[in-house]
Amino acid sequence: MHLAYPAVLAVLLFSVGVYGVLARRNAVLVLMSVELMLNAVNLNLVAFDVWLRDTLHAGQALTLFTITVAAAEIGLGLAVVLMVFRNRGTADVDRLRDLAENAEPADGADDALPAGHPGPSRAADQEKGRAAA
Amino acid sequence: MTAPVLGPGLAAGPLAAGSLSSQGHSFLSPTGVEIVFVLVGLAVLGAAVLSVTTRQLVHAALWLVVALGGLAVEFLLLTAEFIAWVQVLIYIGSVVVLVLFGLMLTRAPIGRSPDADSRNRPVALGTAAAAAATLVTLVVDAFRTTWVDLDAGTGSARATGSSLFRHWVLPFEALSVLLLAALVGAIVLSRRDGDRTPPRPPRPRPGRAVSAARRTPAAPVAPTATPAAPGTSANPATNPATPPQER
């Protein structure tokens, strides 16, 4: 098999993951896109391991390690996302602006953002948070 | 540019010269494995694109299942059997289930959600297209003539296990410690007991403005009080007056 096929597939999967990380708004979907990028790396590792015929099987061992680290990462990431959702009532990464540099008012930056948003989304957000209670 | 750099360095490595060059192998006469690989790769790519573009959040997780399962098939085609089954077990078996749990627990809307994509979607599209173009050019230029000899047995459970427990024991054990740390961290992050309140960022006006806004949520509050209103009244768990065991 030509090595170009798995390499190009891995590159395209990685780019799809990049798009998902940048374009998605829900934090759980961002984590899913990160998983896609990690899988692209896994495909590269396996393909290069098969190509190089490493006697230590470094590529496949590293793939196993990557899969394990990805599982741990998504567990921790979901715990963080759930904690943020419990404290804020939303898991949208666009609305978590406490650490934003150019916050419009100095205090309460997370609440100043919905002023720039259309009204229904803010009302739906409050409704969602109230239903969460 | 990279091919002359990569070529002599790799040829001086432990590889035989026959496995480096694709003498007698052309892209125009693909083997059966290559045809299956490309077809499954197209399915994987389509499922991945649907997974990052669909507006139904639960469908995104299900398309992720298709993409990860297709990648397991690709691992099988690359003769990495053990990795393929680990991929099926861990990714499809646990990671996707975790993601679905996360979607449900954050109350993802069933059905279309119009605000699934953020406003910087064109920027993301441009970045992804630029990355794809650059990397595809680089990779095709570097590995255009590289041929991989696939023979069964190089990725079986016996070979992977012997190399893992013979040469990679120390990273394996370190990884188990890392998993334990992740487990403890996830438990610490997600528990909500009352005796130890989690550290909370200091809010500007935690007391009166919040409780006043909670009592009359629909009333137009003064503009100085509104910044504290939606974030805290949206979820009473952040209110110090409400015990965290309520939810």
Image (spheres, coloured by chain):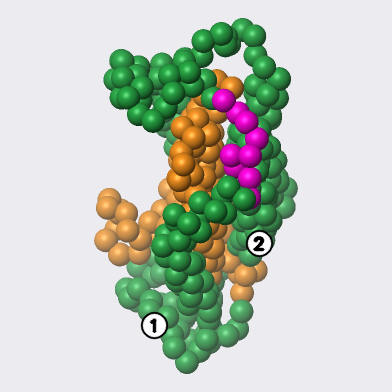
Residue at image x 33%, y 75%?
Answer: B202
Give residue B136's quadrant in the image. Answer: top left
- For mark 2, does the 10 Å Cα neighbourhood hold few (<14), some (14 to 19), or many (20 or more) residues? some
Q: Secondary structure at mark 2?
A: helix
Q: Is residue A59 left or right of residue B90?
A: left
- Residue A81 pos. (x, y %): 51, 62
Residue at image x 58%, y 66%?
Answer: A129
- Residue B110 pos. (x, y %): 72, 52
- Which of marks 1 and 2 precedes in the sequence? 2
Chain letter of the orange region? A
> Which amino acid, mark 1?
Gly
Q: Is mark 2 in CB contact (under 8 Å) with mark 1?
A: no
For residue B207, the mark is 1
Distance, label 2 to label 1, CA atoms, is: 34 Å
- Residue B132 pos. (x, y %): 46, 26
> Which amino acid, mark 2?
Phe
The residue nearer to you, when weighing B231 against A58, is A58
- Residue A82 pos. (x, y %): 54, 66
**Figure label count:** 2
Magenta highlight range: B149-157
* Image height of B15 relative to B218, above or below: above
The residue nearer to you, when weighing A46 against B124, is A46
Residue at image x 61%, y 79%?
Answer: B247
